[in-house]
């Protein structure tokens, strides 16, 4: 659902005065100064005032705010549960029964002016397909739009977003290209990574050269668009039959940057077979391992899932670096390790508490490998599939299969 004119529903506590802008002539308002009692679109207090009003209403209605995610509200009574997520004036909500969903919609409509959009199908540029077998989130329409926007709709498709031979650097002797266009292409691709983890590494690598883009950098970006031309309908599949176990993967290349020899780290976190979060970033300093960042994300997810009544102990964090595991598990502080950043001691602390369990994984089974370097076609497709990146057609078949099975189940029950 969407709140109509959300910000004016909030009440601001500070004294804020407004007057008509210079050059605006109106005999009705002249040069009067007005004191605001309600928030308007414009003042920096407006978003906070609206959030405070909505939060107060939900808390008075019996909801409990998430312990770490302050946009999450839950209401549990008996065996029934309502879940509400807010994003400014857009609200996603659900419940364990249709009656709970309908009653919440009526409750919100009595308090605010709402436009009820119905079943979640489109949200913040994301397209959502729901079915008995699971949920599919994709940006197929957005992908086609940006291909058309940057005149790449008729480009020659390619099977991977980046060649394994690609080694980008500053290319100071190369021909400079339009910085505005290059940044526009990068920005559009970064938004697409919300449902396309398969292009995360390539986009983030190209984004490092926005300050002074060259022809070689634009060619690398165009290859990403050519890959999107080949796979416009890929998205993330969240199976309803997946078991609920939490795990994380962390990987890093070794001094991969040709400019300063810093490494690129990649992490991903999965709930069962469903990819929940991922990252690809350049290290802040040379030889700084980012296993701790994956650990931090797992701890945040553990706390959030705790609000849903799910409990996890010794969450497996899979890495292919035996040295990182040895340093984290070794309780003795040697002279060779005392210089190590406090992040490693953070990792060791949570290992000793039993929050996480560092597990070695073979390099070929390291899912985070796709976020650290360009891969050859076979390995790339395999890891992409294991992360749950599928095509719309495959998902449609799964949804149709689920509907058919449901119809047969109902028919058999009726006959019995």
Image (cartoon, rainbow, N blue to C red):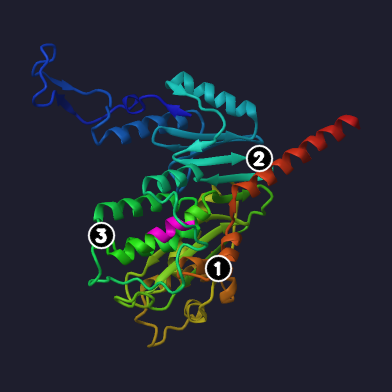
Please say if 303 is above or below 18: below
Q: Mark 1 points at which residue?
A: 377
Q: Circle 3 sits in a helix, a strand or a loop, which is it?
A: loop
- How far across and down, in percent of the image, does residue 256 sit? 39, 76
Crowd rating for badge 2 (residues with CA inside 10 Å; few <14, some 14–19, many 20+): some
Please say if 195 is above or below 221: above
On the image, which quarter does residue 243 sit in? bottom right
Quarter of the image containing the C terminus? Answer: top right
From the viewer's side, name the closer residue of 89 and 60. Answer: 89
From the viewer's side, name the closer residue of 30 and 12. Answer: 30
Crowd rating for badge 1 (residues with CA inside 10 Å; few <14, some 14–19, many 20+): some
Q: Which of marks 3 and 1 is in front?
A: 3
Residue 131: image tag: 2
Please tell me which residue is depicted at 35% across the width and 31% down the height of the picture: 50
Q: Earlier in the sequence, mark 3 or mark 2?
A: 2
From the viewer's side, name the closer residue of 354 and 21. Answer: 21
Whether residue 315 is visible = no
Which portion, as a residue range, is magenta? 222-227
Please say if 308 is above or below 98: below
Could you tell me how far apart the alpha carbons at marks 1 and 2 are, in whole angstroms?
31 Å
């Amino acid at each position: 659902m969407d709140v109509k004119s959300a910000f004016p529903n909030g009440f601001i506590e500070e004294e804020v005065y407004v007057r008509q802008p210079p050059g605006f002539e109106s005999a009705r308002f002249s040069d009067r100064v007005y004191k605001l009692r309600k928030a308007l679109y414009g003042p920096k207090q407006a978003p906070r005032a609206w959030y405070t009003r909505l939060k107060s209403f939900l808390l008075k209605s019996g909801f409990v705010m998430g312990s770490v995610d302050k946009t999450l509200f839950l209401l549990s009574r008996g065996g029934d549960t309502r879940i509400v997520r807010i994003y400014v004036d857009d609200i996603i909500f659900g419940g364990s029964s249709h009656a709970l969903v309908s009653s919440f919609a009526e409750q919100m409509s009595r308090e605010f002016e709402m436009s009820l959009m119905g079943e979640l199908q489109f949200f913040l540029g994301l397209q959502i397909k729901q079915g008995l077998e699971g949920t599919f989130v994709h940006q197929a329409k957005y992908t086609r739009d940006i291909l058309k926007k940057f005149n790449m709709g008729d480009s020659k498709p390619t099977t991977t977003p980046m060649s394994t031979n690609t080694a980008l650097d500053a290319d100071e002797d190369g021909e400079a290209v339009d910085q505005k266009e290059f940044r526009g292409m990068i920005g559009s691709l970064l938004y697409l990574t919300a449902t396309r983890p398969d292009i995360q590494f390539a986009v983030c690598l190209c984004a490092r050269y926005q300050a002074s883009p060259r022809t070689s950098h634009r060619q690398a970006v165009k290859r990403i668009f050519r890959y999107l031309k080949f796979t416009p309908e890929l998205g993330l599949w969240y199976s309803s039959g997946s078991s609920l176990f939490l795990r994380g993967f962390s990987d890093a290349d070794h001094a991969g940057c040709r400019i300063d020899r810093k490494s690129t780290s990649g992490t991903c976190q999965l709930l069962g077979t469903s990819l929940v979060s991922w990252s690809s970033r350049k290290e802040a300093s040379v030889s700084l391992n980012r296993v701790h960042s994956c650990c931090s994300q797992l701890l945040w997810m553990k706390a959030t899932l705790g609000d849903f009544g799910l409990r996890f102990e010794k969450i497996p964090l899979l890495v292919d670096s035996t040295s990182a595991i040895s340093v984290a598990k070794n309780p003795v502080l040697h002279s060779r390790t005392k210089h190590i950043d406090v992040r490693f001691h953070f990792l060791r602390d949570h290992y000793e508490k039993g929050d996480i369990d560092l597990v070695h994984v073979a390099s070929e089974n390291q899912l985070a490998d796709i976020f650290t370097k360009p891969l050859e076609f076979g390995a790339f497709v395999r890891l992409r599939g294991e992360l749950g990146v599928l095509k719309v057609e495959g998902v449609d078949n799964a949804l149709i299969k689920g509907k058919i099975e449901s119809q047969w189940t109902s028919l058999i029950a009726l006959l019995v």
